[in-house]
Image (spheres, rainbow, N blue to C red):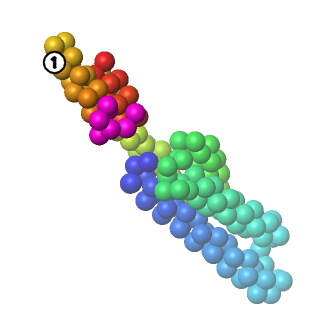
Amino acid sequence: MNKTKKILIIFAIIFSFVDIGWNIFDIVYYFKLEPVERSPIFYLVYTFIAMFASLSVAVLLIMSIWKNGSLFRQRYGMYMSALVISIILNLFSIASILLIITMFLSDWVWIKPEKSPQENVVEIKPENREQKIASLREKHDKGEISDEEYREELTKLL
């Protein structure tokens, strides 16, 4: 996973928790008001729904980058679910904007390919090969190398 993408997702998690805190404040403030001054009950229900949606966004994002982001491709569905919930909840929240930005960042990790076994093999001339096999056999007979080492070296030469 790209480090920039991971950092932006972590900030989106932080802002989701800030949204949860704001929703809790809003709910407490609703009940502190006099009944006459309160907004309709629908506002309170929406605030509860928004709080649980923000919590689900935070949990899904945490699970998507779990283990230092090494499983991000396997848990891509969790990331996309969090993105969709965040956008439905509030398109212009900071968490949604950060997640939209992360969508467009590449998460490919470029790894230099290992050399194939054919590239590692050094070409040995036939007469040189016979000399090395003979010396290898002598070392094995004298007990300087074990059976396993003898077989490994022999397979390398052949």
Residue 126 seen: yes
Considering every residue shown, the one lying at the far top of the view is 126
Q: Is residue 97 magenta?
A: no
**Helix, strand or loop at mark 1:** helix
Determine if residue 100 is in view: no
Is residue 126 found left or right of 80 in the rendered image? left
The question of residue 145 being in magenta is answered with: yes
* Left or right: 5 in relation to 124: right
Query: Residue 14 versus residue 22: which sits nearer the camera?
Result: 14
Location of residue 116 in the rendering, given as x and y in whole percent from the top left corner: 32, 25
Give the magenta-colored segment's residue range: 140-147
Q: Residues within 10 Å of mark 1 (few under 14, many from 20)?
A: few
Amino acid at the residue labelled 1: Asn
Q: Position of residue 69 (x, y in %)?
A: 49, 52
**Residue reaching furthest to the front:** 142
Q: Residue at x 40, y 49 (%)?
A: 2
Q: Residue at 58% of width from left, 48% of height from top?
A: 79
Q: Going by the image, does 66 lie left or right of 35?
A: left
Number of residue marks: 1
Classify residue 85 as left or right of residue 96: right
- Given residues 23 and 44, the one toward you in this image is 23
Residue 126: quarter of image: top left
Q: Which quadrant holds residue 75?
A: top right
Residue 42 occupies which quadrant of the picture?
Answer: bottom right
Q: Residue at x 78, y 70 (%)?
A: 44
Image x and y of residue 15, in percent:
54, 66
Question: In this orientation, which residue lies closer to the viewer: 22 or 126?
Answer: 126
Up-down relation of residue 9 to residue 152 (above or below)? below
State the residue position of label 1.
Answer: 128
Q: Residue at x 70, y 66 (%)?
A: 51
Q: Is residue 108 above or below residue 101?
A: above
